[in-house]
Image: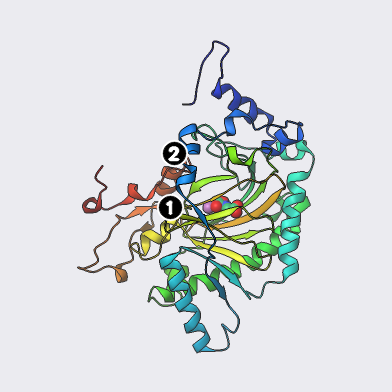
Amino acid sequence: MGEIRSNGEYNREKELKAFDETKTGVKGVVDSGLKTVPRMFIRPEDELSKEHEIPCVNLQVPVISLQGIESNKDVRDKIVKQVLYASEKWGFFQVVDHGIPFEVLEKMLQGIRLFHEQDGDAKKMLYCRDIVKSVMFDSNYDLYKSRAANWRDTLAIMKPYNGFLDPYEIPEVCRDVITDYIDEVLKLSDILLELLSMALGLKPSYLKEEMGCNKGWVLSNHYYPPCPAPELTLGTSKHSDPSFLTILLQDRVGGLQVLHDNQWVNVQPNPNAFVVNVGDILQIISNDKFKSVYHRVTTNLVGPRISSALFLKGVESTEKLYGPIKELVSEDNPPVYKEFNLLDFYTYFVSRPLNVPGLDHFKAENHAVVN
Ligand code: OGA
Ligand code: NI
């Protein structure tokens, strides 16, 4: 793993350890006054030299308005069609007219900023690696596995499928705004799961009740500090999400890109919109009808950039099995994936770096990838 040399040359392992031990993340590096990007964050040469092979184009991910969703069946049917199109063709869409007050969104972003910009000591107490706690601060959960570290820090808040989240565990600087935000965004997740169920031709309650998609979740509150050399590193490496669905709030800075038809498409910041994307598990249970697509976050000279991602994680237990939904498979459309439980799914996810694809691991035998 990494470059380990003891003859005075670059020692990656040592640099990672030193960074980890500061417990203040990338923000701590920037605050220390460093004006260059430390080597551990620099993308490998082979990756950088291929960067130009994927162009960045001026397209827009689908934007879906929820206006009138409750009052009118025709409107709802139209929205379901839009969700179907976006989930099949893009794996990403933006939701507007969702009814959540703008103030809740603004305060949420401000609260996350306050958390990350407070004194280092307060964050150090929450800094965590390996042990999973319901509230933790970390930077690069895959620090010792990835080839290059990402330019971001995260405050993660977790609600297990079979338990409660104690609000008092959330740091006081952002406790109230985060609890208000969670209430609202979970209501939105109910609506989205109904729309997605209908888009799959299932009864509206299917993804919520039968699959328990939003029973367990993680809210990852990211902080991307300004970066002195944005072309050398990434805020978040190219990846797909280990979730059923991800609902993301981003500020006005920009940097999120989605891979569409082998081109990077910028997800234009819209302070009133949520960015919604299909995760790997929804791709699996929809038997590849919906697409969990690659996305990444570039860094900026200016900043910080702040975002909050709610990952709907389902029921993480050995008892509940997930695989392609029976109603969605047939003789002509056999299951592409095998059945598995989500404990195994997430264990596999954390065993590899973020940018290594994970879906193939769960393919059914007759769909195994031939190398
Ligand atoms: C993620 C992610 C995007 C962003 O957390 O999985 O893709 O804009 N985040 O922070
Ligand atoms: Ni993601």
Query: Residue 365: horizontal and vertical position, in percent?
Result: 23, 50
- Residue 351 disc label: 2
Query: Label 1 neighbourhood size at 10 Å, few (<14), some (14-19), many (20+)?
Result: few
Query: Residue 140: horizontal and vertical position, in percent?
Result: 58, 39
Image position of 370 with respect to 62: above or below? above
Look at label 2 and name its amino acid: Ser
Query: Residue 79: horizontal and vertical position, in percent?
Result: 50, 79
Q: Does the residue labelled 1 lie within 8 Å of ligand 1?
A: no
Residue 64 lies left or right of residue 240; in this view the side is right
Q: In the structure shown, which secondary structural element does the residue marked by tag 2 occupy?
A: loop
Image position of 306 with respect to 50: above or below? below
In the rendered image, the quadrant that contains the C terminus is: top left
**Residue 34 seen:** yes
Q: Distance between the residues labelled 1 and 2?
A: 18 Å
Q: Name the residue under label 1.
A: 317
Look at label 1 and name its amino acid: Ser
Residue 368 lies left or right of residue 207; in this view the side is left
Residue toward you, 203 or 78: 78
Query: Label 2 neighbourhood size at 10 Å, few (<14), some (14-19), many (20+)?
Result: few
Image position of 208 with respect to 125: above or below? below
Q: Nearer the viewer, mark 1 or mark 2?
A: 2
